[in-house]
């Protein structure tokens, strides 16, 4: 069935009429900041401590807007007899946001979580050269990176958190074992001292106590003699009493 002449115009006018009847909403920017989604792509922040200069982000960038310079340093052996190792040291990390198309490939391919999205977008410049942010400026953007969203209740725990928890539990178990060994050693040292204290011989009486005993012995002897004299005197007294009768 051929279209009715003027149907397209009628549909367009219907859309216009519906829009005209809606309430107009004006964003009061810059007086009121917009509420951006949590995963907004504003600017890229650099967490320098996690960067190992693997160059993956620079190689995968389709615009070649990431510039990295580094050098190698020799790390001495950690233990006697070990061998020295070399590691990369970051000298420069810069992103040219005049060339960046905000695809996020650099953040996705980073194996050590050194790059993050920040929702900040107010970094326009009058000079195009100032849109090349060096590592100090990229580090400042890290303070504006929002916290990651919470995981689902049934989600698997991240490997980094699991490894950190395992290491913390192992260290805690080692400290508890050392404390137990120290407690057992202390008890073993105190046991001979306790036994020696229990086996101490009886102490001799003090000289004052001996003098007191010596002073009491004559009184005891006098009492015994008086008792004997009274027993000897009783038969004579009984005979006298009989003669009187």
Image (spheres, rainbow, N blue to C red):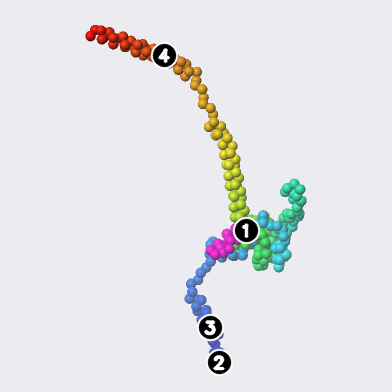
Q: Nearer the viewer, mark 1 or mark 4?
A: 4
Mark 4 or mark 2: whose residue is earlier in sequence: 2
Gap in angstroms between the C-alphas marked 3 and 1: 56 Å
Q: Which mark is residue 221?
A: 4
Mark 2 or mark 3: whose residue is earlier in sequence: 2
Gap in angstroms between the C-alphas marked 2 and 1: 64 Å
Q: Which residues are magenta?
A: 144-164
Residue 128 visible in the picture: no
Q: Which mark is residue 123?
A: none
Gap in angstroms between the C-alphas marked 1 and 4: 95 Å
Q: Residue at x 49, y 21 (%)?
A: 205
Q: Is residue 220 above or below residue 117?
A: above
Q: Residue at x 60, y 47 (%)?
A: 177
Residue position for label 1: 160
Q: Nearer the viewer, mark 3 or mark 1?
A: 1
Q: Position of residue 231 (x, y in %)?
A: 34, 13
Gap in angstroms between the C-alphas marked 3 and 4: 143 Å
Quarter of the rendering containing residue 154: bottom right
Residue position for label 2: 1
Residue that sits furthest to the left in the current view: 245
Predominant SS of the magenta segment: loop
Q: Nearer the viewer, mark 2 or mark 1?
A: 1
Q: Is residue 103 above or below residue 179?
A: below
């Amino acid at each position: 069935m051929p279209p009715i002449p003027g149907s397209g115009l009628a549909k367009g006018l219907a859309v216009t009429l519906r829009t005209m009847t809606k309430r107009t909403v004006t964003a009061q920017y810059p007086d009121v900041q917009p509420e951006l989604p949590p995963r907004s792509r504003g600017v890229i922040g650099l967490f320098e401590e996690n960067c190992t200069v693997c160059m993956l982000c620079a190689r995968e960038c389709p615009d070649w807007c990431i510039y990295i310079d580094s050098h190698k340093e020799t790390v001495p052996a950690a233990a006697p007899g070990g061998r020295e190792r070399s590691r990369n040291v970051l000298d420069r990390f810069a992103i040219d946001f005049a060339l960046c198309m905000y695809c996020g490939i650099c953040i996705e391919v980073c194996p050590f979580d050194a790059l993050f999205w920040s929702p900040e977008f107010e970094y326009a410049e009058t000079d195009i050269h100032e849109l090349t942010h060096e590592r100090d400026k990229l580090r400042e953007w890290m303070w504006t990176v929002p916290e990651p969203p919470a995981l689902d209740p049934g989600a698997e725990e991240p490997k980094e958190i699991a490894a950190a928890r395992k290491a913390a539990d192992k260290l805690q178990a080692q400290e508890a074992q050392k404390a137990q060994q120290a407690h057992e050693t202390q008890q073993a040292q105190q046991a001979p001292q306790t036994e020696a204290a229990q086996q101490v011989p009886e102490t001799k009486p003090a000289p004052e106590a001996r003098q007191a005993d010596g002073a009491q012995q004559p009184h005891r002897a006098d009492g015994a003699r008086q008792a004997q004299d009274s027993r000897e005197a009783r038969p004579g007294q009984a005979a006298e009493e009989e003669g009187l009768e």
